């Protein structure tokens, strides 16, 4: 059915929403709800922190060197995600593969560093969920809940990236129309990266 015939069949009105734009809309709705979840967690963290009389200075306990590198790593992975999308739109299969792999590696290394950081805090600094030697026991609880919640999102994002890479390995997602699936993935990954910048600022720096 032609576009004109389709418009006539709908009483002269042609819906501006296509399957591609429905996918983007669905992702934006999901991200809006997810943003509220992170916003609530960070707001609760702020309320607990400023209501506590013995909250430690986060930078003195957690440090900022490793977490700063993790932040830089995620920012770099956002750049490679942009390059992967551009390659898909330009029908550059090798560029798509290369930049998707680099983005996945960024996510995997981030998760590995987070595991190392958690292990260091628990075993070497004695910072646990419900008790620590630095003041309020909620310091550890809020740290692990918020960074763990974000880590779950990174894990989901890495799995999402791997699926798109496998399905698109032979060129399925090349071209303006099919590259839309890569763009939707990019929306999620950029969101995860942006949230980490906020977490890094509120949890580690302030």
Image: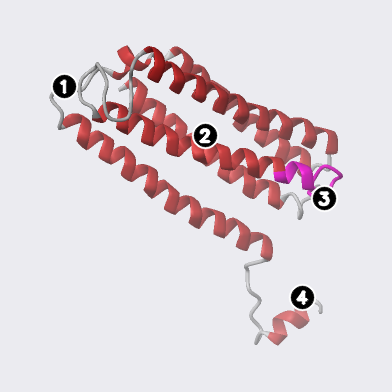
Q: Position of residue 1 (x, y in %)?
A: 81, 79
- Which dot, 2 or 1, sits closer to the camera? 1
Image quadrant for the C terminus? top left
Image coordinates of residue 55 in percent, x first then y, are 20, 22
Determine if residue 169 is in view.
yes
Query: Of all residues shown, which one is farthest toward the left?
Result: 53
Q: Is residue 61 above or below residue 110?
A: above
Tag 3 near tag 4, CB within 8 Å:
no
Q: Residues within 10 Å of mark 3 (few under 14, many from 20)?
A: some
Residue with the mark numbered 2: 193
Which residue is under mark 4? Answer: 3
Residue at 46% across, 37% down: 150
Question: In this rendering, which labeled residue sits more in front, label 4 or label 1?
Answer: 1
How many neighbours does mark 1 have within 10 angstroms: few (below 14), some (14-19), or many (20 or more)?
few
Quadrant of residue 63 in the image?
Answer: top left
> Which residue corresponds to mark 3?
172
Residue at horizontal 49%, vertical 50%?
31
- Taking 89 as reference, is 146 above or below it? above
Of mark 4 and mark 2, the one earlier in the sequence is 4
Mark 4 in CB contact with mark 2 (< 8 angstroms): no
* 1 or 3: tag closer to the N-terminus: 1
Judged by depth in the image, the label closer to the viewer, 4 or 2, is 2
Question: How far apart are the two marked residues, 3 and 2, measured between alpha carbons?
Answer: 26 Å
The residue drawn where x is 23% and y is 18% is: 56
Query: Residue beneath label 1, please?
Result: 54
Instruction: Kindly indicate the quadrant of the structure image that contains residue 109.
Output: top right
What is the span of residues highlighted in magenta in the rendered image? 163-173
Q: Is residue 96 left or right of residue 181?
A: right
For the residues marked 3 and 4, what is the alpha-carbon distance in whole angstroms? Answer: 25 Å
Residue 37 or residue 79, whichever sits in front: 37
């Amino acid at each position: 059915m032609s576009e004109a015939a389709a418009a006539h069949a709908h009483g002269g009105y042609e819906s501006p929403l296509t399957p591609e734009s429905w996918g983007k809309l669905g992702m934006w709705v999901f991200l809006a709800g997810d943003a509220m979840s992170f916003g609530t967690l960070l707001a609760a963290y702020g309320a607990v922190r400023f209501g506590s009389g013995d909250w430690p200075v986060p930078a003195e306990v957690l440090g900022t060197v490793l977490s700063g590198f993790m932040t830089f790593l995620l920012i770099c992975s956002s750049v490679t995600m942009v390059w992967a999308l551009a390659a898909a739109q330009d029908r550059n299969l090798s560029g798509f593969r290369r930049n998707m792999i680099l983005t996945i590696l960024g996510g995997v290394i981030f998760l590995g560093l987070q595991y190392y950081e958690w292990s260091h805090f628990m075993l070497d600094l004695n910072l646990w969920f419900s008790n620590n030697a630095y003041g309020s026991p909620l310091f550890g609880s809020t740290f692990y809940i918020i960074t763990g919640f974000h880590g779950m999102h990174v894990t989901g994002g890495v799995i999402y990236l791997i699926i798109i890479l496998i399905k698109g390995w032979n060129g399925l997602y090349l071209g303006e129309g099919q590259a839309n699936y890569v763009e939707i993935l990019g929306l999620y990954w950029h969101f995860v990266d942006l949230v980490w910048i906020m977490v890094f600022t509120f949890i580690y720096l302030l």
